Image (cartoon, rainbow, N blue to C red):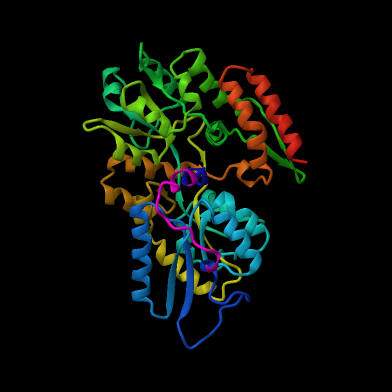
Amino acid sequence: MLRSRFRRLAAATAVAVVGLGALTACGGGGGEDETSSGPAKLRFLSLAWQKESLQANKDLVAKWNAEHPDIQVEYVQGDWNSVHDQLVTSFEGGDVADIVHYEASAIGEFSKQGYLADVSKLLSDDFKGQIDPGVWDTTTFDGKVTGVPFLLESQVVIANKKLLDAAGVTVPPADGGWTWDEFQANAQKLTKPGQYGVAWALKSPTNRVLNLALNYDGKFFYTEGGKTEVKVGDAEKEVPKRIHDMLYTSKSASPEALGMSGADTLPGFFGGKYAMLPGSVSLRQQMVEQAPAGFDWVTLPPIKGMSAKQAANPQTLSISEDSKHKKQAAQFLEWFLNPTNMATLAKGDWLVPTGKQANQELVTLTGGKQGWDVAADSAADLTVAPFQKVDGYPEWKTKYATPALQQYFANKITLDQLGTQLVDGGKQVLR
């Protein structure tokens, strides 16, 4: 998920942690836009942290302020490592920025507590129409849209082009990814002594598995009559079984990669030990920055089952319910996230813009190189997943799903035992 990615990487940056006082809105309380003789003043809490992204955010705010003297936006620097606790304190104290940057899976609790404004009536139909309904669903809670989704993270495959060519494996087009059967068959072709076809980095397997399970309509969480329970049927078992088969039947996947993160696999990948790395679309940044000179890599589209659907957990921009300038905040958001600006922001973060036109502009901006054509095309298959709407998911994931999946992928329990543990964990958490 996005939050884990940024928590891991943000520690390496020099981004200063914003103090609670910096989150103070320009006069909390009240829900309606106030009228005054001076310009409307908004505070924008941004979590941008990468150099290019930081500059893009600050430049856009400066450009807005120069062009809109009646609505002035103050850029406030936040930090992914601490923002959740800061927001809890700030919302409860009534002192929060007018516009808050976060992610879909994290704003639900604030939305349900009434801290975030419903933006569905504040934004134009043209703007809303640029983003697919399935992505809007990720920021819809109890019928209210409380976040504007703008950056996505899809799962793709990074491959060593030289090894693919040597094995006679053809790179699929950006809009035509391999089926799971084709992916497994090609991994087998790419396996030989001293070389595995694929390295599945499964140190934290739960999000990856539940994300890809949507390829086969695997939901895991089912709600009926107001009660949610975990079910593990054939659809939910399909992806874990295929990964397990690659590890222990065809032996085309490296067992040693199981305890690794995506970054941990890079030395072996660059050294020719693994031919393919399934992982986040943002992994392309590390390819550009860390690959040895002359290393030829390509980005392959998401793998397909019954579909290529994956869970979407977009970065979001929300408007505080306490903001006195909701209409002006929405006006800024529509400008800040227009197609050209959204493409610029996505490029700075190596992620996928939610807007359809922004995707097109991003491909034009980059010439589709460095996998940007694949990244942009992958947005069409990202949608809300059942686990993203379950309040008990974090506890189920930590206490039950992750240990059970790690045991299964280590070949210590059977597929049926995995299912039993996941279901039993659901009974403990979803009461």
Q: Residue furthest left?
A: 294
- Asked if residue 20 lies in the magenta stretch, the reply is yes
Task: Name the image quarter holding residue 418.
Answer: top right
**Visible in this render: residue 145?**
no
The image shows residue 5, relative to residue 156, as above or below, that is below
Residue 218 spot, x, y in % from top left: 60, 33
- Asked if residue 219 lies in the magenta stretch, the reply is no
Q: So how many labels did they put on this image?
A: 0
In the image, 102 versus 329, the foreground residue is 102
In the image, 325 versus 85, the foreground residue is 85
302 left or right, relative to 165: right
Residue 278 spot, x, y in % from top left: 43, 30
The image shows residue 173, relative to residue 79, as above or below, that is above
Give the extent of the magenta segment: 7-21
> What residue is at 55 percent from the left and 70 percent from the top?
24
**Visible in this render: residue 85?**
yes
Residue 363 spot, x, y in % from top left: 31, 48
> What residue is at 48 percent from the left and 88 percent from the top?
37
Quarter holding the C terminus is top right
423 left or right, relative to 37: right
In the image, 355 versus 92, the foreground residue is 92
Magenta segment's dominant SS is: loop
63 left or right, relative to 305: left
Residue 25 spot, x, y in % from top left: 54, 72
